[in-house]
Image (cartoon, rainbow, N blue to C red):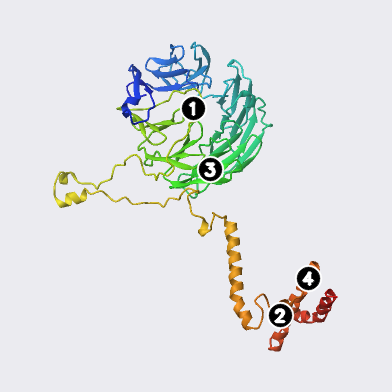
Amino acid sequence: RFQHGLKTERFVPSDGASQGAQDALSSLASDGTGACRCLAYSANGEFFAHCNSAGVKVRSLAANSTVDLPHPKAAQLAFSPCGTVLAVWEQYAVTSDNPQGSPNMNLYDSSTGKLLKSFVHKKADTWRPSWTEDSVVCARGVTGEVHCYQDRDFSSMRCRLSIAGLAAYSMSPGRSDACHVAAFIPGSRGQPHSVRVFRYPDLSPTAPVANKSLYKAESVSFQWNRRGTDLLLLTASEVSKDSYYGEQGLHYLSVRGESCAVPLQKGRPDLPHGFVVTAGSMPAKTTVYNLRCEPVFDFGTGPRNVTYFNPFGNILCLAGFGNLKGDVELWDFANKRLMAKLLVPDATQFQWCSDGVHFAAVNNCLTVYHYSGKVMARRDFDCLLEVAWRPQPACEPPKLRYDTSKSFQAITQQTQATRYVPPHLRNRDSGSASQQAQPRQQQQLHNYELPSNQRPAADGAAGGLSKAAVKNQRKKERKRAAATAGAPEAAAAGEQPGGGGALASFESTGDAEKDKRAKAILRKLQQIDKLRADQAAGKQLELNQMEKLKTEDELRQKLDELYL
């Protein structure tokens, strides 16, 4: 989608060596009837819809047929997961002839163009209906309520969730027989905020299957895993003592009722047994957590603020877009190895292809990359607005091939920054101008942390011992050093290195239990001998020490009994 219309390109993958990058893309069709306002593919790739000045056009790619809908001002489009229903949203408008306004959200049959239902929904960020994976259940948010419809029957509600103050909701992915609805309810009168999870169709406010109380959460973003069994809650507050930008938090909640706060170190969660979080001030750290919210691996720190998994979850992309310069890292997630690094400056859109091997980046031109970092195709536009891959049927996960011994550097060449030269000094051969035009030396602002599998063992401990193991090892070394240092002193005093006094002449009784008691008595007798030596030297003893001296005869009698 570009400034003057719509263009369809076919991408033909190649090895990137036998043909140029421009040859990998070939034009299929072009629509120059006017600026394209929005576009959308169905999840199965069978339907494609876009809006221009003439209205909304819905094209069946399998049947090669087109349906026209009378909505030239459509702002957003959305298909149900099976592609059977198309939702069209327009800006809500009130005129003098129609002060009440007209319904601005319409649901159509994708194949026939039949109008199924019209609603009024004024907010652009919450208008999109939610469907289950099989498109059986449809839910839409209304003020303080969630209305659910079933089997494309929008004339009557199947059930509703009604909670006073309900601010946001989210329906879990998956089939309709295992569907859950999560609702965010802001707190009032000193009560904490909360997120409650209900099982469809039992949406009674008193029957949640899971509940999580939240603090400092003025808004919540929901992120389900693909099975719809686990949920991450990204909370945000506008006020914080530590940051001008407010404060964020991450919490875990499952439909089984388990919940906890995720300890962020310094969210695209898409893993079947965990999730990945990039958090912290720049340079941000990316950490892998298990479902107990325990960190199990981290990718170090770097200039990154987004994470993208390919459709199969075996390649992880860590990137820094927006206010960052566009560093991109591509990781083999299973083996935790870096496969490629590249620079994609000024990118406004990033999207993986359905094959899990290629991805597209948009920065006023369309560039298609291979996961190895090679540029596979490129198209330049005057004003490129949006790019969408056509979804394809599921295929086998790609087998990753890359050089594990390669020392990575940035694949895309970066433009070297030069000093600013005033206009009146440009194009001169003077020494001052040439000095000013010399490249600036790049200064590293941060010391980046390495991934956890590339760091040396803590404090030189072999094998990467844990902190507790290192602590115990240090304690043993200190005891060993003390024993070695004390040996010469004991020899000088006429004692054996193993100990002094009564313990040095200890004889076994032949019974382990009696030996233990005998050694304890000998230690007490040693202490008494030391106290008598201090008393003979003129030192004043305490009352408890005097009482210990009186027990000497009793201790020696017990010791003699042990050797009988």
* Quadrant of the drawing holding the C terminus: bottom right
Q: Residues within 10 Å of mark 4 (few under 14, many from 20)?
A: some
* 510 left or right, relative to 402: right
Disc 2 residue type (three-letter) = Gly
Locate residue 537, reporting x and y percent: 68, 88
Label 4 SS: helix
Q: Nearer the viewer, residue 117 or 259?
A: 259
Disc 2 versus disc 1: nearer the observer = 2
Disc ID at residue 431: none
For mark 4, what is the residue?
515
Distance from the alpha carbon under mark 4 to that under mark 3? 54 Å
* 540 left or right, relative to 472: right
Disc 1 versus disc 3: nearer the observer = 3
Distance from the alpha carbon under mark 2 to that under mark 4? 17 Å
For mark 1, what is the residue?
123
Q: Nearer the viewer, residue 104 or 309?
A: 309
* 174 left or right, relative to 366: right
Please say if the residues under marks 2 and 4 sit with CB atoms less than 8 Å apart.
no
Q: Residues within 10 Å of mark 2 (few under 14, many from 20)?
A: some
Disc ID at residue 288: 3
Disc 3 residue type (three-letter) = Val
